[in-house]
Amino acid sequence: MKNLYLALLCAFATAVAFAQKASTTTNVWTSGRPDGHAPISVMGDHTHHKGEWMFSYRFMYMNMEDIQKNTNNITTSDVYSNGYMVAPLKMNMKMHMVGAMHAISNKITFMAMFNYLENDMDLQMMMNNMNTKFSTSSSGFGDIKVSMLYQFLNKNRQELHGILGISIPTGNINKKDYTPMSQDKKVILPYPMQIGSGSLGTNIGLTYLGQNSLISWGSQLKGTLYFGTNNNDYRLGNSYDWNNWVALKATNWLSFSARIEGKIVDDISGANPDLMPMMVTTANTQNSGGKYLNSGLGFNTLIPNGSLKDLRLGFELGYPLYQNVNGIQLTQKQTMTVGLQYAF
């Protein structure tokens, strides 16, 4: 994974050198059309002109259910036979994201993202040869992300920009809830139910965009890396994403998109000493991370004129094509993302 991170840095430096040799032209890539933005689930996909602002709100819903070991589906009985007392059944995650972008020049755009998460998990415990079902939940504000986008090139209806940012560990990593074993006392929840990372992180990426009169396309390579262990003696796994999409401009206010994403997530390093790894699969760091191939279909709308000019609505429904998880985990199912964007 370190080699991939170094490759990102090399690509970033190469793009800078290439951009310095590129001449300007009026035949530039433009965001002023419905397919001028990537599918709504993609972040940091575009830059702005000097002085422009954009505010956004996104809502994402992710559903996870059924149990998987590596690439195979397993049952709760299989979980118990692996030595665990509790098996996860289902998890829903809701995320509200508020973002702001501002361009201080035609080359540099700053971006900030704030989010609020709500997690709910259903579980089943084997006790005295009887299955007992229960639920846990957590919610709160997550980590804050601040990034700089630098435009290397905008020429021949192609645009290239880099992303460099930090992830500030403002999210809570000590969320607790009641369980049948804890009686009247709340206990620390496992890793997937925590709101933040607890560690300082960095985001680095490169985004390429292109378009003609009817079609636009894009590719984004991005990595998120965490440094040091948090106050609970663990560090979330680094993640590496490669997003690719194509969009068809149906009218001057509507476009349709298709997206495919390859994703690698490292497992968690270290362990929270307050968690019992063999109590539930989600408390064992060996059951974290994996390799994924995801798809998405959606649409973007743009109001081209009037008092609401440049107001956008985006929608995308995502579905996994391939999952190879580390250890035993819930299977990712549908993901829905909807959002509003307004630039001025």
Image (spheres, rainbow, N blue to C red):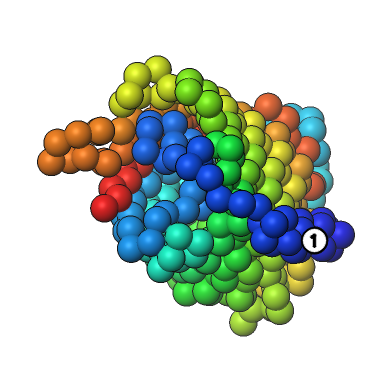
Residue 11: percent from the left, percent from the top?
Answer: 76, 56
Viewer-closest of 196 and 186: 196
Judge left or right: residue 159 versus residue 265.
left
- For image coordinates 79% across by 33% down, the residue present is 71
Viewer-closest of 261 and 173: 261
Viewer-closest of 295 and 282: 295
Secondary structure at badge 1 equals helix
Circle 1 Cα neighbour tier, 10 Å, few/some/many (<14 / 14–19 / ≥20): few
- Given the image, on which type of amino acid does mark 1 rest? Cys
Residue 72: percent from the left, percent from the top?
Answer: 79, 30
- For image coordinates 37% across by 52% down, the residue present is 96
- Residue lying farthest left? 307
Residue 214: percent from the left, percent from the top?
Answer: 48, 20
Q: How many marks?
A: 1
Whether residue 324 appears in this view of the structure is: yes
Query: Is the residue 27 above or below the residue 1 in the image?
Result: above
For the N terminus, the image quarter is bottom right
Residue 5: percent from the left, percent from the top?
Answer: 78, 61
- Residue lying farthest top? 250
* Residue at mark 1: 10
Whether residue 223 appears in this view of the structure is: no
Judge left or right: residue 150 versus residue 271.
left
Q: Quadrant of residue 14?
A: bottom right
Query: Is the residue 273 above or below the residue 123 in the image?
Result: below
- Residue lying farthest bottom? 231
Viewer-closest of 198 and 139: 198
Q: Quadrant of residue 304?
A: top left
